[in-house]
Image (tube, helix red, strand yellow):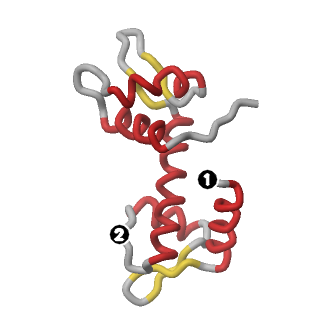
Amino acid sequence: MKDEKLTTDEYNALDEVRRGIQGRPSACVARNTKRLSGLKLLSFARNGHLSLTDKGKEKLFLRRCILGLRALAGDPAAKVDDDVIAFLGKKSHIVAADGGFAVTDKGRETLADIEAQGL
């Protein structure tokens, strides 16, 4: 089984590819391309352009959800993207509260599990 735990630098490279690369890839992307493509998070087109795979898009979205849940646990009025709010609400990790969102017991359990795994 491959070690699919990513570093912050690798997440930054994925996010940069998601936003689109104009011209040459940055040093961050160049440094991490081999491992990320090996994990099937990035793919090369025939013309040499890098793009995110569905697995890469999912990995980035889950990271945004984790960061959003952590932010809301610290500050119920924290700014979190709408798609992340919708996902966390649908999964019953957060509920609407006065001036923001409150993390539910299920959300706190999830955060504790994430911390225990070291993500």
> Residue 73, relative to residue 88: is it above or below?
below
Image x and y of residue 95, in percent: 53, 79
Q: Nearer the viewer, residue 105 or 91?
A: 105
Q: Quadrant of the N terminus?
A: top right
Image x and y of residue 65, in percent: 51, 58
Q: Residue at x 29, y 28 (%)?
A: 21
Q: Which residue is mark 1?
A: 119
The quadrant where residue 105 appears: bottom right
How many numbered marks appear? Answer: 2
Q: Nearer the viewer, residue 36 or 92?
A: 36
> Residue 66, relative to residue 36: is it above or below?
below
Whichever of labels 1 and 2 marks the residue nearer the N terminus, that label is 2
Image x and y of residue 16, in percent: 35, 36
Q: Residue at x 45, y 31 (%)?
A: 52
Q: Secondary structure at mark 2?
A: loop
Residue type marked 2? Lys
Residue type marked 1? Leu
Q: Nearer the viewer, residue 95 or 15?
A: 15
Q: Residue at x 44, y 17 (%)?
A: 44
Direction right: furthest residue: 1
Query: Badge 2: how crowded within 10 Å, few (<14), some, or many (20+)?
Result: few
Q: Residue at x 55, y 78 (%)?
A: 103
> Residue 56, relative to residue 87: is it above or below?
above
Q: Which residue is mark 2?
A: 79
